[in-house]
Amino acid sequence: MDLMNGVKTIIFDFGGVIIDLDHAGAVREFKKAGLVNAEEVLSPYHQQGIFQEFERGAIDRARFYEKYRELVGVNVSENEIDNGWFGFIGGLEDYKLDMLDELRTKYAVFLLSNTNPVVMDWAFSPAFGKDGRTLPDYFDRLYLSYQLGCLKPDRAIFDHIVADAGILPEETLFIDDGESNCVAAAKLGFKTFVPKNGEDFRYVFET
């Protein structure tokens, strides 16, 4: 079945879709920042504890640093903690940025990400894309969990996008590397696709 049949809007996840995820890198950097059980605490898809609170916007950046230091029992610097989050960031291929530019000539293109201000500070900087372009330059709208106060796969985050953007789920393709996120979206009528980390999935858009 042609996934693009009738599609007017495409919603992309960020980590594992637009950028490659490096879970091992995050584990390594958070261990350097005192989180000795980083393998157990960190997930490629859905964070727990204070990490989830931060991505849900339940705590701000200053409170996250405070609670992180309480958790690890070491007075690590903000930069050391930030390096843990940056450890998740793998490669960003230029062809994916070109793909987004091309898709926007035909479709509305949104981003929906479980993320936090640390990662987004980088993504909103000229260090992100080509020629100094930032993440917002590649999308029509951004939906970020910490700003919305909810996380995928909660229904509320999908309901918000539908209402805010005035889209129809059946006319929308949702691309996310988290299987549970796509299952939740499919139940609401979205078309879905789950790429593998690092996959060149441009073939999906060939019609």
Image (cartoon, helix red, strand yellow):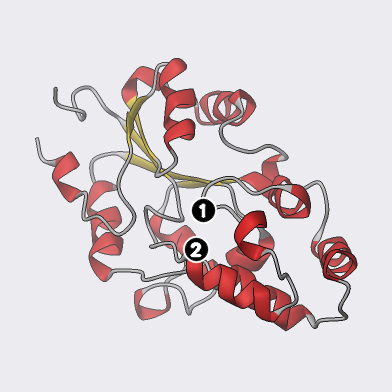
Point out which mark residue 178 bears. Answer: none
Determine the image quadrant of residue 171.
top left
Q: Are marks 2 and 1 in contact (CB under 8 Å)?
A: yes
Q: Is residue 128 left or right of residue 62?
A: left
What residue occupies the far left of the structure in this picture? Answer: 207
108 sits to left or right of 80: left
**Residue 167 is drawn in which quadrant?**
top left
Please name the residue shown 41% across and 21% down the image: 186
Q: Position of residue 172 (x, y in %)?
A: 35, 28
Q: Residues within 10 Å of mark 1 (few under 14, many from 20)?
A: some
Left or right of 5: which side holds 50? right
Please identify the quarter of the rendering in which residue 42 is found.
Answer: bottom right
Residue type, numbered disc 1: Pro
Relative placement, left or right, of 138 versus 84 is: left
Residue 145 in percent (x, y) is at 64, 45
First in residue order: circle 2 vs circle 1: 2
Residue pictured at 67% horizontal, 81% vertical: 32
Q: Secondary structure at mark 1?
A: loop
Residue at 9 percent across and 35 percent down: it is 207
Above-or-below relation of 54 to 71: above
Is 183 above or below relative to 144? above
Where residue 176 appears, as percent x and y from the top left, is 40, 42
Q: Label 2: which residue? A: 23
The residue labelled by disc 1 is 44
Residue name at image x 42 percent, y 35 percent = 179
The reply to whether residue 121 is in sight is: no
In whole angstroms, how far apart are the C-alphas of marks 2 and 1? 6 Å
**Res 2 visible:** yes
